[in-house]
Image (cartoon, helix red, strand yellow):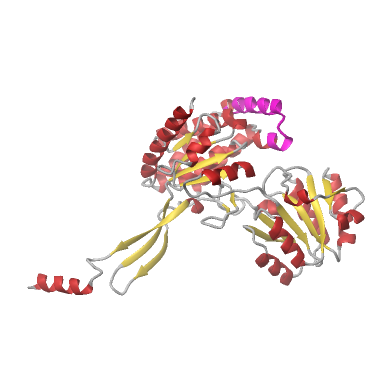
Amino acid sequence: MNSEEIKDHIYSMGKKARAAALKLSQLTEVEKASILRAMARAVREATPEILAANAKDIEAGEAKGLTGAMLDRLRLDANRVDAIAGGIEQVADLPDPVGEELEKIDRPNGIHITKVRVPIGVIGIIYESRPNVTSDAAVLCLKSGNATILRGGSEAIHSNRAIAKALQEGGEPAGLPDGAIQLIPFTDRESVQVLAGMDKYLDLIIPRGGKGLIETVVSLARMPVIKHYDGICHAFVDAAADQDLAVAIIDDGKTQKPSVCNALETVLVHKDIAEEFLPKLEQRLKVRGVEIRADEHALKILSDAKAATDEDWVTEYLDLIIAVKVVDSIQAAIEHINEYSSQHSEVIITRDDVAANQFLTGVDSACVYHNVSTRFSDGEEYGFGAEIGISTDKLHARGPMGLKELTSYQYRVTGDGQIKDKARQDALLSTQEA
């Protein structure tokens, strides 16, 4: 397709999405749940087609030389497809945020003001690699009353098409409005530019992927953007840490699933326990096959580590690699994190509640933990159901984005004839009485 054809196609999608959003905003909780359950059934029934499409993406990805982490993000199997369907059902069962009364105000003049949660409208989502995002994004937007236009990466184009087809065809008989869920069917880079400039129809755009993609979208967007930057997540092992607990938390954070954004990438260790603790950590990580890149101090203690460079403190490895640094104090740890973190998720391991509070209040990240693995930075783990991603922004959403984060609010004001000019109102009443 040429440039003009791409623009016309995407603008046509935007027009359909705007009309669908108006219909979605009026669906009841029961109606939306019924649509979602029908979509879940359709995904399960389409498992063979989805897996066949995914096999094409895997084959192409291997030919392109994608990393093991990228292929793991891309790969689907029967269990993962079933988990996608299960996630849809879970969202169907969640409370509907639309219509929730957030605040009521009664003014002395008799005006009644209600602050009510409402859908945002039309949301564009640009993402890479993970085909499950196609479902997660679509169902969360649907449940929160939003139409969505999806633009996936070229690596997962066959999988994305198959999943989107199952969602649309499954939802339509149950009442899914036409245009409520749309996937841009091509992966030309120009489609990102067109989508980001389509403020006539798009109310919000959410990029999920590498820093390059996000920075491109931010530079082009003519509507609000919620960013999901990479996850350079830290663990700080305080002098008062339970060292066995620290080893377990770091092991889980790094190796349970290293290809995800809430996996640990850097460990900071208080100098007072470094000589005792680091060999314990190295022993556990060596069993897991983790490569350690250490600063000068840690390098003298560890028996099998590589020297870290400045680049290691700002790298999201998404692999079995971790950076280790010895710090002089909790304040030094906080300063390091605030300088190098992507403001995603950080943890302190300590038995000192005062130190924990200093860390929790001093670290400027979306999710901060005390004696808990960063792997819990997840919408489902927070009880939100499937998530749209982890926002590293501060406005209007931060951290795991569930249903409530995909809504705005509206002030609904009622009265019985109040007008601003009291004198005119009194004169009007006098005339009526006469």
Q: Is residue 64 magenta?
A: yes
Viewed as shown, does residue 134 lie left or right of 16? right
Residue found at x 51% / y 56%? 396
**Residue 370 location in percent, x, y?**
70, 62
Q: Please tell me in which quadrant of the rendered image residue 213 appears.
A: top right
In the rendered image, the vertical position of residue 62 relative to residue 323, given as above or below:
above
Q: Is residue 83 visible?
A: yes
**Residue 236 location in percent, x, y?**
76, 60
Q: Nearer the viewer, residue 181 or 362?
A: 362
Magenta: main secondary structure equals helix
Which residues fall within the magenta stretch?
50-71
Q: Nearer the viewer, residue 170 or 202?
A: 202
Viewed as shown, does residue 252 lie left or right of 42? right
Q: Nearer the viewer, residue 336 or 100?
A: 336
In the rendered image, the vertical position of residue 156 relative to residue 110, given as above or below:
above
Viewed as shown, does residue 282 lie left or right of 17? right
Q: Please tell me in which quadrant of the rendered image residue 214 appears.
A: top right
**Residue 313 location in percent, x, y?**
75, 52
Q: Nearer the viewer, residue 392 or 148?
A: 392
**Residue 41 location in percent, x, y?**
51, 34
Residue found at x 39% / y 41%? 18
Q: Is residue 177 visible?
A: no
Number of marks present in the image shown: 0
Q: Is residue 63 magenta?
A: yes
Q: Please tell me in which quadrant of the rendered image residue 368 appears.
A: bottom right
Image quarter hosting the C terminus: bottom left
Residue found at x 46% / y 30%? 169
Viewed as shown, does residue 263 lie left or right of 207? right
